[in-house]
Amino acid sequence: MKLQDYAQIIRSKNSGPFELTFDILFDSLEKYEHFVASQVLTKETFAKLYQINVKDIITFEQFKPARGIKITIPRPWPQGSVGESDMHGSQQYANLLTIEVPE
């Protein structure tokens, strides 16, 4: 099953003009715990998916009370600068959608 069919919310957004934040939220504790235990999304796999260095990941948090995962990275370009293509950072989550979640 793909993450887009498993998680309740997958989104990205600005975390200020120089950072992007990704959120993955689950509608049940069981789904959250299963996904975290599967280890299909780690700092290393996220870095590979977004073609960044693992050291550039600012935040990679699994927060059980919210049944969610939050990842923050530097923006490739500052918000609104020349070459920047997503002013609000809201389209950057697409790479996460097709992550395979094991049964």
Image (cartoon, rainbow, N blue to C red):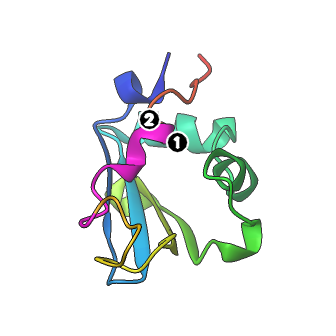
Q: Residue at x 34, y 59 (%)?
A: 85
* 74 lies left or right of 84: right
Mark 2 residue crowding within 10 angstroms, few (<14) / some (14–19) / many (20+): few
Residue receiving disc 2:
30
Residue nearest the viewer, comparing 17 with 22: 17
Inspect the image, locate mark 1, and give the three-letter code of the amino acid beneath it: Glu
Residue nearest the viewer, comparing 95 with 61: 95
**Which numbered marker is on residue 52?**
none
Inspect the image, locate mark 2, and give the three-letter code of the amino acid beneath it: Glu
* 38 lies left or right of 11: right
C-alpha span from label 1 to label 2: 5 Å
Q: In which quadrant of the rendered view does residue 101 lie?
A: top right
Q: Position of residue 80 (x, y in %)?
A: 28, 77
Mark 1 residue crowding within 10 angstroms, few (<14) / some (14–19) / many (20+): some
Say whether residue 88 is magenta. yes
Q: Position of residue 19 (x, y in %)?
A: 43, 77
Q: Which residues are magenta?
A: 87-95
